[in-house]
Amino acid sequence: MSVAGKVALVTGGAGAIGGDVVRRLIAGGAQVVAADLDPAAATRAAADIGGDCIGIGLDVRSDAAWAEGMAAVIACFGRLDALVLSSGYYRPNIAFEDMTLAEWQRHFAVNTDGVFLGCQHAVRAMKTTGGGSIVTIASTLAVQANPMGIAYSAAKAAVLATTRAVAKHGGPFNIRANAVLPGPVDTAMLAGNVTAEMDQDALVGMLSARIPLGRIAAASDVAAMIVHLCGDASAFINGAAIAVDGGQTA
């Protein structure tokens, strides 16, 4: 793994995907700041993982919080080489006509504003130290919209467009930006799709039947690709949208 000696900030660092990213980065010799909306959860995650890992609270919707978080990274480790934007929000099963403006805006605040702010602060930091890698988490729903999840689909499509723009802007400064597009992943967010008509097992069975590999993703499947994009082995990958979906969108 080509992340030894790198300094990384991972949002959603106490979550399923973000937590596995942090573990893999630490195992590869990186120094990591695990950030989460819940500071206590971030601190616990960092303590459990060990190594050169610290946990901080970070509300990705806040410009001031990003400034404080980035300052903490620089104060602890001196620079930023990789940013992983793993925070996300999804409230499923809302019909298009029933989607409120407030709910729409919450999806965009976390999923899109958080990515814009994170990329902006990371670019500023990375320009001073010779470059780095930014990895955003979009979704297959960015390219295959779900009318029962219109706000999430639209927000993740905006993440994809933002990532591509950052890749073009950052390229001359050796700053890469790539988007990972997971399909269904076995996380708490997926469990939120359970309804009275369909329990967890039925939901997983239905989703697995749509995937050529015959199963939904584990968090580790997605995390492995994210960590690859953080490292030197992906040095010429920039502006890519990489589906980690078992072939669902092929």
Image: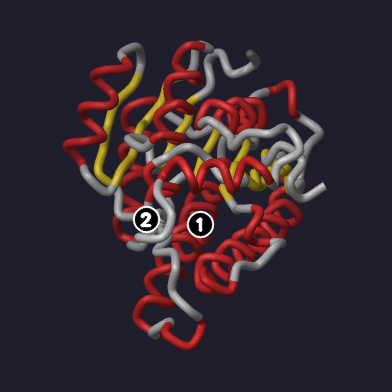
Is 208 placed left or right of 61 in the picture? right
Residue beneath disc 2: 60
**Secondary structure at numbered mark 1:** helix
Across and down, in percent, residue 88 comes to: 43, 53
Which residue corresponds to the image point at 46% horizontal and 65% vertical from the top-left?
A: 113
Number of marks in picture: 2
Q: Position of residue 183 (x, y in %)?
A: 62, 46
Residue at image x 61%, y 30%? 230
| Disc 2 crowd, CA 10 A, few/some/many (<14, 14-19, 20+) | many
Residue 187 percent location from the top left of the image = 42, 39
Residue located at (54% from left, 67% from top)? 155
Q: Between 134 and 14, which is closer to the camera in this rendering?
A: 14
Location of residue 23 by image quarter? top left
The three-letter amino acid code for the residue at tag 1 is Val
Indicate which disc residue 115 carries. 1
Cα–Cα span, label 2 and label 1: 8 Å
The picture places residue 95, in percent across and down from the top left corner, at 48, 79
Indicate left or right for 104 with 44 as reference: right
Determine which quarter of the picture holds residue 63. Answer: bottom left
Depth check: give the residue in front, 81 or 124. 81
Find residue 32 and report its image quarter: top left
Determine if residue 127 is in view.
no
CB within 8 Å, label 2 to label 1: yes
State which quarter of the image contains the N terminus: top right
Q: Nearer the viewer, residue 112 or 220?
A: 220
Amino acid at dot 2: Val
